[in-house]
Image (cartoon, grey):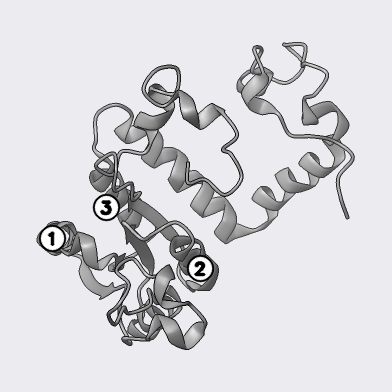
Amino acid sequence: MKANFELSCPLCGVQACKYEPNTKKTPLFCPMPTENEQLAAIEREYLQDDELRKWACESARTESAGYCRRTRIEEIMDFARRIGATKLGIAHCVGLIGEAKVAREIFLGNGFEVEAICCKVGSIDKEKIGLNDEEKVQPGQFEALCNPVAQAELLARAGTQLNVVIGLCVGHDSLFFKHSQAPVTVLVAKDRVLGHNPVAALYTSHSYYQRLKKQPTKGVDA
């Protein structure tokens, strides 16, 4: 059922949700007044579901303990320890195998068991699922399909308790999130153009990347 409101939090100049309830006037588009019953029900879930409450508490503790002090990989390890995860899974892109190797060494050096699986596992021919040769990255030769479903399944069979994504492609990462049995966090978000720092496009959207705010001409690669 489609909701009868639009979620537009980036437009908010009040941020009333950061403060004690009813101390700030919310903007008209804020969902807190209109969806108060749903939000209250979700709050009850945090209070009634022991596992959910534990994860929420440990997430908040990880945030406060490492705020502006710990790197993301350090926070991942801290969070893993807090939730009792001793076996980590790494789902990585074949193009970031070097980064995955370093992350694996860091996790192992900090006492974790690690299972790591590459995106090309299974060597499925892209043409088998319906891609045309001209749709490949490099037409005219065999190209293996990225296989995030297999990555998720093999990590589940290995018994990982927290999975870490390193550079899965857009779309492939979504499939991995959907199929992973263990909770997932991201260490590296792939951006081949910006050296895996996708937020740089947002910071420069007023200058170098102004084109991002313009609708591309139909049929023309943006």
177 with respect to 49 (left or right) = left
Mark 1 is on which residue type? Gly
Q: Is residue 128 above or below residue 5?
A: below
139 with respect to 69 (left or right) = right
Q: Which residue is mark 3?
A: 77
Image point (24%, 38%), residue name: 71
The alpha-carbon separation of the residues under discs 1 and 3 comes to 19 Å
Instruction: Compare residues 125 and 122 and report the one nearer the observer.
Output: 125
The answer to whether the residue labelled 3 contacts the one labelled 2, judged by CB atoms less than 8 Å apart, is no
Instruction: Compare residues 160 and 58 and report the one nearer the observer.
Output: 160
Indicate which label's residue lies in the foreground, 3 or 2: 2
What element does badge 2 sit on?
Answer: helix
Q: Position of residue 54 (x, y in %)?
A: 51, 53
Q: Position of residue 191 (x, y in %)?
A: 33, 46
Q: Is residue 151 above or below residue 40?
A: below
Circle 3 Cα neighbour tier, 10 Å, few/some/many (<14 / 14–19 / ≥20):
many
The alpha-carbon separation of the residues under discs 3 and 2 comes to 24 Å
The alpha-carbon separation of the residues under discs 1 and 2 comes to 23 Å
Q: Which residue is mark 2?
A: 175
Q: Quadrant of the N terminus?
A: bottom right
Indicate which label's residue lies in the foreground, 1 or 3: 1
Q: Which residue is mark 1?
A: 98
Image point (47%, 41%), residue name: 222
Image quadrant in which you'd find residue 166: bottom left
Q: Is residue 172 above or below residue 23?
A: below
What element does badge 1 sit on?
Answer: helix
Which badge, 1 or 2, is on the more N-terminal residue?
1
Image quadrant in which you'd find residue 178: bottom right
Circle 1 Cα neighbour tier, 10 Å, few/some/many (<14 / 14–19 / ≥20):
few
Q: Position of residue 92 (x, y in %)?
A: 29, 65
